[in-house]
Image: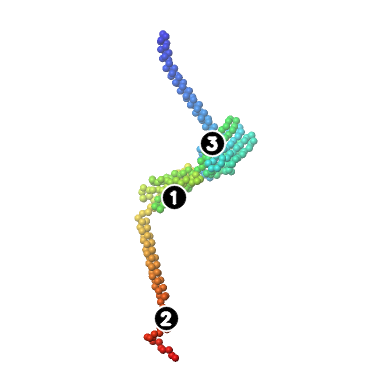
Amino acid sequence: MTGSSQQAGWCKKPTSCTDARATLKVVRKTTYTIVLLTITAVAGATGNNSVSATVGNSCVLTCPSKPNITMVTWKISPKVGGPCTLGYRADQNKTDRTNCSDSMNWKFRPDWDPALEIWQVGIDHDGNYTCEVVATEGSFHTTYHLTVLVPPRLTMYCDDHGNPMCKAMAGKPAAQILWVLESNSTPKEEGHDNGTVTVLSTFTAYSTNVTNTTCIVSHPAGNQSMTIACHPPGNSTWILHCVVSLASLLGLLFLLAVLHCYTFCGSRTMRSQYKPRNLPSAELSGPNSNSAPEQR
């Protein structure tokens, strides 16, 4: 009987291990759930958002509005220039600003709505904006990474070989150039000191029958398109170049002939000027002279 009970006990041991594994799985799931909830709560308290604004427009950055706010602080770290701060203290009902330009300020009263507004967004406003709120519930942080978009200026023209050229000038970020018809062009980029980029693309057609070509510029600030008609040089253009070259050669030969004639005629004129024309009477009189003798 004893051996039988021991055998039964050993048989229950695997069952006990199975229960332990199941319990461990439950504990793991519970731990994962707690971690995820904690991360979500922290992310809600310290949000990090990416926003964009087109240059020249206005931009509003919101801040958590909590009851019984005691302090609000906007900390701004632009990529260009030094940092600045906007602050509000409820106990003193006072606002202050440090090193902030007039282009940014509270949108409303900070005790009502602590949102920040930027007028006439420029490239120098690109950077990080953090709002810190202190209330009776606790502290809350919200961070924005502001990206300023600069729409490129689109131009098209034909090069010396009759190929359409599409240029997206001074865009931020760099624009993408596409052609309506297929092309094996590789765009070239040129960066500028203010962070903008100029992109140039040359259309190379697979067929010489292409006349009208459309360029499409894709950009986060908006898409643009333009069409141009370029005429590649053909046989008629080659003949025209030959005619022009021949005419220029004939004109050069004519000028050389005129110059030679002028030089030859000028030398004869100079020799004729040095010929003696009016000789003295003594030199003209001689033994064969027909002049009458001098009367005495």
Coordinates of residue 264 in the picture (x, y in percent): 38, 70
| 80 over 269 or under it: above or below | above
Of residues 221 and 170, which is closer to you in this image? 170
Sequence-earlier tag: 2 or 1: 1
Distance between the alpha carbons at the discs numbered 2 and 1: 82 Å
* Quadrant in the picture for the C terminus: bottom left
Q: Which mark is residue 143?
A: 3
Please provide percent x and percent y for residue 29.
47, 25
Q: How many marks?
A: 3
**Gap in angstroms between the C-alphas marked 3 and 2:** 114 Å
Residue 25 vs residue 77, the one in the foreground: 77
In this view, 265 is above or below 284: above
**Residue projecting furthest to the right:** 92
> At label 2, which amino acid type do we have?
Leu
The answer to which of marks 3 and 2 sits earlier in the sequence is 3
Q: Which residue is identified by label 1?
A: 156
Cα separation between marks 3 and 1: 41 Å
Q: Is residue 186 above or below residue 73?
A: below
Q: Which mark is residue 279?
A: 2
Residue drawn at 36 percent across, 56 percent down? 238
Mark 2 vs mark 1: in front: 2
User: Does the image show residue 234?
Assistant: yes
Circle 1 SS class: strand
| Between marks 3 and 2 in the image, the one whose residue lies nearer the viewer | 2
> Can see residue 57?
no
